[in-house]
Image: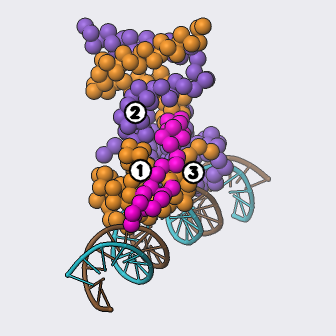
Chain colours: A purple, B orange, C cyan, D brown
Amino acid sequence: MSIRLTPRELDIMAVLWRLGSGTVNEVGDVIEDDLAYSTVLTMLRTLEGKGHVRHEADGKAFRYYPVTQPEDAGSGALDRVLDKIYQGSRELLVTRLLADEAVSPEELRRIRELLDERLGELES
Amino acid sequence: MSIRLTPRELDIMAVLWRLGSGTVNEVGDVIEDDLAYSTVLTMLRTLEGKGHVRHEADGKAFRYYPVTQPEDAGSGALDRVLDKIYQGSRELLVTRLLADEAVSPEELRRIRELLDERLGELES
DNA sequence: TATTAGCTACTAAAGACGTAATAGTTAATA
DNA sequence: TATTAACTATTACGTCTTTAGTAGCTAATA
């Protein structure tokens, strides 16, 4: 079974992945919604219980570190989207992903290079 | 706010998207887990309450049709994955998506063509 | 030493989710 | 007409998710 994070858990993990680590207050500050300190703490403790984060003392406070990495959570989430919504079609998914106006030509080129590399490997 | 479906709701919508429509029994048959008839019915009614499906009579039974389409649910789900897990990097997401061994060269080529088209549009 | 600031631990609780039993309805059929 | 089969409607309920109040601890400080 692949790792499944609840929406709120994902919010918190995203902060930790971005910052590398965080205290309860640091995480709370970054999260968009105004959550009580104790709420964030509870979430982090829940995540710790599930083995997704760990903590160590940092002065008076605890500093939390991600244990589960984006890839771990990502492949599951992505597979699910791919499967259920795009019916397994990576093309369709990529199409939608790049349909967004905001994608820059540079980004598109870099992605194309990525593909070329991958194709080169396969042909050699 | 973008559309958010729970995992189970997504399972059911996926069936409806695939089949085009379905009765309670048809949906239940396709879903992997063995769910009681009444469970599937409840889910469909919930989805109807949220406006994601509608139904019409089909003989004795009701036939359910998707109202919410894959794109509607997809962009939200994909954006969320992109945002939270891949920190907004489409490259990173595509890399992971194509890292899978199972991706065929044909599929890769088709995706590259897609990119070329897109780039062509931008440059003209 | 008494107080305060800044934390963590504990406890509670509302609401969403998922599952299903059972009651009710309708149309075919024996 | 009485019975049965195939559905839908109603209702319940355990678990998970989220949120947060409050108690307790510790170190600085007035």
Where residue C23 appears, as percent x and y from the top left, is: 41, 83
Where residue A24 appears, as percent x and y from the top left, is: 57, 46
Q: Amino acid at mark 2?
A: Glu
Mark 3 and mark 2, same subunit? yes
Q: CA distance from mark 1 to mark 3?
A: 42 Å
Mark closer to the observer (1, 2)? 1
The residue that label 3 is drawn on is: A40
In the rendered image, residue A112 lying in the magenta stretch gets the answer: no
Q: Amino acid at mark 1?
A: Ser
Front one among A108 and D29: A108
The residue that label 1 is drawn on is: B21
Mark closer to the observer (3, 2)? 2
Q: Give me the residue at 59% from left, 43% from top.
A: B2
Mark 1 and mark 2, same subunit? no
Q: Which range of residues does the magenta coloring cover?
A: B54-79
The residue that label 2 is drawn on is: A71
Image quarter of the C terminus of chain A:
top left
The reply to whether dot 1 and dot 3 touch (C-beta < 8 Å) is no
Q: Secondary structure at mark 2?
A: helix
**In this view of the protein, can residue A48 be seen by the observer?**
no
In this rendering, the answer to whether A36 lies above or below B116 is below
Which of pointers 3 and 2 lies earlier in the amino acid sequence? 3
Mark 1 and mark 3, same subunit? no
Q: CA distance from mark 3 to mark 2?
A: 23 Å
Count residues near mark 2 (Cα–Cα under 10 Å), then give few for <14, some for 14-19, many for 20+. Answer: some
